[in-house]
């Protein structure tokens, strides 16, 4: 087990196979959910089961690629302020995009069907590292667009029906709508581009990870 400083102005506890979860310090125990704890004895099998259950082909392909030559860590991140935290299994790969994947702890039945299915599989997915922007949030904390002051254009929407559930390193936002659309919002211009359904958006994001790319808003969309 390692304890290191992180980019969130705090410390991270890093565990690998053979480490003892009983050694996790009190400062980070609240990050060790029952789901993360239960998977520690065999995270490869746990994530292989997620890949089998996933109805999203690109997501399954990405997970299976990570598991071909599994290199994993259980990472528990405490930042500053104290509510700035994250946890999950980090999977390293030389062929697809590496990422830290949390496991779901709450049912997400209030979401559109595709998103509820997605959140039954995973929680947050972070492909840039703790303290850096870039990833998808878990099933909680999706801010509606009414919380932001943008000059929205590019798609017909109601700001009460569209929420944010992730971002790129430059701050552009992954969005979803209650009428089953998913896509991107440009932080700089307020331009909205839907990729199709939420399922289409999920597959698009994971297709980028399969190409070892960072999913980002494409500024060609606004032209």
Image: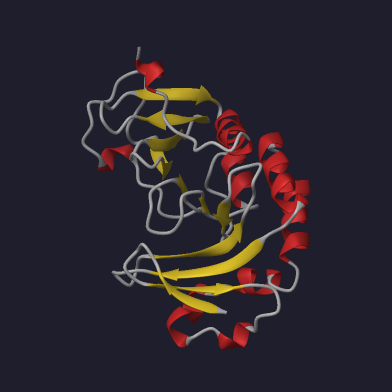
Q: Is residue 158 left or right of residue 58?
A: left
Residue 134 at what x, y percent from top left?
Answer: 43, 46
Residue 174 at what x, y percent from top left?
Answer: 43, 37
Quarter of the N terminus within the rendering: bottom right
The answer to which of 102 and 66 lies nearer the viewer is 66
Quarter of the C terminus within the rendering: top left
Q: Is residue 27 left or right of residue 33?
A: left
Whether residue 18 is situated above or below residue 170 in the rendered picture: below
Question: Which residue is drawn at the image coordinates 64% and 74% (left, top)?
Answer: 37
Residue 170 appears in which quarter of the rendering? top left
Residue 205 appears in which quarter of the rendering? top right
Whether residue 89 is situated above or below residue 179 in the rendered picture: below
Residue 215 at what x, y percent from top left?
Answer: 49, 35
Question: Which residue is drawn at the image coordinates 71% and 35% (left, top)?
Answer: 57
Q: Is residue 212 left or right of residue 29?
A: right
Whether residue 201 is situated above or below residue 221 in the rendered picture: below
The answer to which of 145 and 86 lies nearer the viewer is 86
The answer to which of 124 and 177 lies nearer the viewer is 124
Res 103 visible? no
The answer to which of 12 and 176 lies nearer the viewer is 12
């Amino acid at each position: 087990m390692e304890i290191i400083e992180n980019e969130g102005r705090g410390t991270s506890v890093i565990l690998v196979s053979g480490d003892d979860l009983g050694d996790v310090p009190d400062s980070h125990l609240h990050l060790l959910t029952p789901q993360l704890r239960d998977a520690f004895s065999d995270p490869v099998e746990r994530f292989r089961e997620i890949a089998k259950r996933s109805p999203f082909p690109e997501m399954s392909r990405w997970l299976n690629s990570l598991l071909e030559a599994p290199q994993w860590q259980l990472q528990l991140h405490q930042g500053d302020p104290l509510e700035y935290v994250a946890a999950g299994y980090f999977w390293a790969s030389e062929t697809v995009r590496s990422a830290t994947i949390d496991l779901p702890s709450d049912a997400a039945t209030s979401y559109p069907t595709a998103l509820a299915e997605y959140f039954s599989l995973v929680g947050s997915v972070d492909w840039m590292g703790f303290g850096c922007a870039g990833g998808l949030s878990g099933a909680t904390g999706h801010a509606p667009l009414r919380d932001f002051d943008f000059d929205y254009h590019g798609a017909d929407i109601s700001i009460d029906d569209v929420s944010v559930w992730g971002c790129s390193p430059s701050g552009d936002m992954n969005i979803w709508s209650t009428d089953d659309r998913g896509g991107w919002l440009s932080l700089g211009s307020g331009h909205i581009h839907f990729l199709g359904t939420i399922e289409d958006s999920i597959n698009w994001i994971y297709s980028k990870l399969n190409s070892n790319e960072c999913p980002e808003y494409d500024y060609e969309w606004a032209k």
